[in-house]
């Protein structure tokens, strides 16, 4: 027997080590479900931007479909239909925006899609054939290993000297190790039967220590090399690749015979510790992938909720819809930057987002369709306002006509848009009529401006007099003087419009200071301020005065109702306790104040009524 054939057969201790190695390596050989996720991430196709590039790549793959990556094929399929669906959505959107009904949209046939389906079928058929061939090979290997077990059984039961049968036994062992894949469900049972007969053969062997020591030494060298290879895998950047390489090392470790008894635990612990590091990294890698996918799902869920929560009833104008459209497009772009969600949710969350976007653009199409229908009606309304403005533009009743044109301008703003080709011309027609009237009004009232300038100087003089009131003057004299000057102020007519607000604020600020200085009654002060304010209100027209009166009437009604509530509450309270007495006092105080405020409002209403009556009499006299 030469050195090449001096493979030491296993004794009982060697058999036990091989059994232990086999069980542990089987445990490490289990590939987790998440591996498919890793492959899909690591084998994902490079950035492809067109269907033509995908077709080109599929043609290359179809030449060697048996060795192609399933994850790359699935990735190309996903990208193809992502691009294909985006093109369909764009075509459908254009169809709807040009007035078509989304339900009537029919996509055109896509030659690239037909070619894509044909290539995918070719690849699928080739891979199916390969899978069938692999299953057939596994069945053949199973029969080979079953025959090896039968031969081992015959070798043991033949009664021949095991030392003479050793070469045949080693040949069967080599044949067993060279025969690899068998059906998954038969592995454990087959291995146990094989080990049973190997142990029986070794029990029959009576080889000398030289053979055993030689075999132990060679096995130790192999296993130390496997330990070193496993330890180096800790530095492998590709965690998934390291995991698969480890499975191969386990297979080799299992197929290698035993080492000396005193070294067995040490060698196995070294190999097992290196394996633990690789498996821990593998597990952490997939946990990180899961966490990233959960985070991606959370982000995509938030985007879906944003689109789903759009309040369509609030989108009533063209600009509002356009602004919201830009927001939705921004969310779609953001979606594209987010990675995959968990596999079982990835399709569902995409369908949810697509449905929300489809709903938005459908609603937008319906809005623009209704908007287009309403534009003709809006155009007729604006033409009617143009006719009214043109009928008023030559009027010389400056005040009444100015109010009427102002009202028309406000009404114009309430009318919706018209078709773009009419919007400029109809607006120009309307504003030209308005501008013509106000130009004529300005020319006719230019003589009035000199009077307003004189009034301005008079009111400035009154402000000077109010500013120069001596602080040492008696309160009654000050009261009389202030009232006299206020009366004079109110008797002066209008001032230039651009000076009115500034002068008004200066005057009333000064009045307030004097009232505070001489402690003049607050209600009288408010009434006097309101009296002087009426002249400014009248400048804006009679309608403004009426609106002020209506506002005061509403305030009066609210005050009466509130006063009634106070009086009802006072009827239910007693002052038998300190707390009740305090509450009663507070309610009485509030009721008294409310009565005073109500009296002031009534006086203001009377002032407006007097002013309106006076204005009416003046018109009748003219």
Image (cartoon, helix red, strand yellow):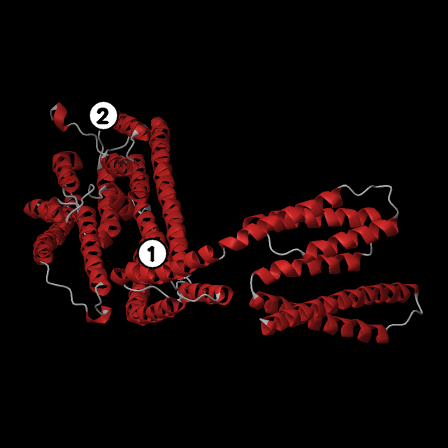
Q: How many marks?
A: 2
Circle 1 sits on which residue? Answer: 322
Position of residue 275 measured from the top left corner of the image (x, y, whole percent): 34, 35
Circle 2 sits on which residue? Answer: 218
Q: Residue at x 59, y 68 (%)?
A: 547
Position of residue 241 measured from the top left corner of the image (x, y, whole percent): 25, 37
Q: Nearer the viewer, residue 427 or 101?
A: 427
Q: Nearer the viewer, residue 292 or 255?
A: 292
Q: Nearer the viewer, residue 530 or 574?
A: 530
Q: Residue at x 5, y 46 (%)?
A: 63
Bin the neighbour count of mark 2 within 10 Å (Cα to Cα): few under 14, some 14-19, many 20 and up. some
Quadrant of the rendered image containing residue 487: bottom right
Q: Quadrant of the N terminus?
A: top left
Quadrant of the rendered image containing residue 173: top left
Q: How far is the residue under mark 1 from the one under mark 2?
A: 78 Å
Q: Is residue 501 visible?
A: no
Q: Does 380 appear above or below 289? A: below
Q: Residue furthest left?
A: 63
Q: Secondary structure at mark 2?
A: helix
């Amino acid at each position: 027997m030469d050195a090449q054939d001096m493979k030491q057969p296993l004794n009982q201790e060697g058999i036990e080590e091989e059994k232990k190695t086999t069980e542990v390596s089987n445990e490490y050989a289990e590939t987790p479900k998440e591996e498919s996720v890793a492959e899909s991430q690591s084998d994902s196709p490079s950035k492809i931007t067109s269907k033509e590039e995908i077709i080109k790549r599929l043609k290359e793959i179809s030449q060697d479909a048996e060795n192609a990556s399933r994850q790359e094929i699935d990735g190309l399929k996903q990208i193809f239909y992502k691009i294909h669906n985006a093109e369909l959505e764009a075509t459908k959107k254009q169809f709807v925006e040009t007035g078509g009904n989304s339900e009537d949209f029919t996509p055109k046939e896509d030659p690239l899609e037909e070619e894509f389906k044909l290539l995918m079928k070719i690849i699928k058929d080739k891979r199916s054939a390969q899978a069938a061939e692999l299953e057939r090979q596994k069945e053949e290997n199973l029969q080979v290993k079953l025959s090896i077990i039968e031969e081992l059984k015959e070798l043991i039961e033949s009664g021949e000297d095991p030392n003479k049968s050793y070469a045949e036994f080693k040949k069967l062992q080599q044949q067993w190790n060279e025969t690899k894949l068998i059906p998954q469900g038969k592995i454990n049972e087959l291995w146990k039967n094989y080990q049973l007969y190997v142990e029986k053969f070794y029990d029959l062997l009576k080889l000398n220590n030289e053979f055993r020591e030689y075999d132990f030494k060679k096995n130790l060298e192999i296993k130390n090399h496997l330990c070193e290879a496993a330890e180096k895998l800790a530095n492998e950047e590709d965690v998934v690749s390291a995991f698969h390489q480890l499975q191969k090392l386990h297979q080799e470790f299992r197929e290698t015979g035993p080492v000396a008894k005193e070294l067995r635990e040490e060698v196995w612990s070294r190999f097992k510790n290196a394996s633990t590091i690789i498996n821990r990294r593998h597990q952490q890698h997939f946990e990180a992938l899961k966490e990233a996918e959960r985070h991606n799902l959370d982000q995509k869920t938030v985007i879906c909720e944003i689109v789903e929560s759009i309040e369509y009833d609030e989108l009533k104008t063209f600009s509002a819809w356009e602004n919201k459209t830009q927001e939705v497009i921004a969310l779609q772009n953001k979606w594209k930057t987010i990675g995959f969600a968990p596999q079982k949710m990835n399709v569902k969350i995409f369908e949810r987002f697509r449905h929300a976007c489809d709903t938005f653009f459908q609603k937008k199409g319906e809005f623009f369709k209704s908007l287009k229908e309403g534009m003709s009606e809006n155009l007729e309304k604006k033409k009617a306002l143009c006719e009214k403005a043109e009928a008023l533009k030559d009027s010389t009743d400056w005040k009444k006509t100015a109010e009427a044109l102002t009202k028309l301008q406000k009404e114009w703003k309430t009318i919706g848009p018209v078709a773009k080709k009419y919007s400029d011309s109809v607006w120009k027609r309307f504003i030209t009529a308005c501008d013509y009237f106000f130009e004529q009004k300005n020319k006719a009232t230019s003589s009035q401006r000199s009077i307003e300038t004189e009034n301005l100087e008079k009111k400035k003089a009154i402000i000077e007099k109010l500013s120069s009131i001596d602080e040492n003057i008696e309160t009654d004299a000050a009261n009389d003087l202030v009232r006299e000057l206020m009366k004079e102020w109110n008797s002066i007519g209008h001032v230039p419009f651009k000076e009115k607000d500034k002068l008004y604020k200066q005057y009333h600020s000064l009045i307030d200071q004097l009232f505070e200085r001489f402690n003049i009654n607050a209600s009288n002060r408010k009434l006097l301020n309101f009296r002087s304010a009426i002249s400014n209100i009248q400048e804006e027209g009679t309608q403004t005065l009426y609106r002020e009166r209506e506002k005061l009437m509403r305030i009066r009604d609210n005050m009466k109702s509130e006063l009634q509530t106070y009086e009802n509450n006072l009827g239910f309270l007693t002052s038998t306790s300190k707390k009740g007495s305090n509450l009663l006092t507070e309610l009485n105080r509030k009721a008294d104040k409310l009565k005073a405020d109500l009296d002031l409002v009534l006086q203001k209403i009377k002032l407006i009524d007097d002013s309106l009556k006076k204005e009416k009499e003046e018109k009748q006299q003219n």
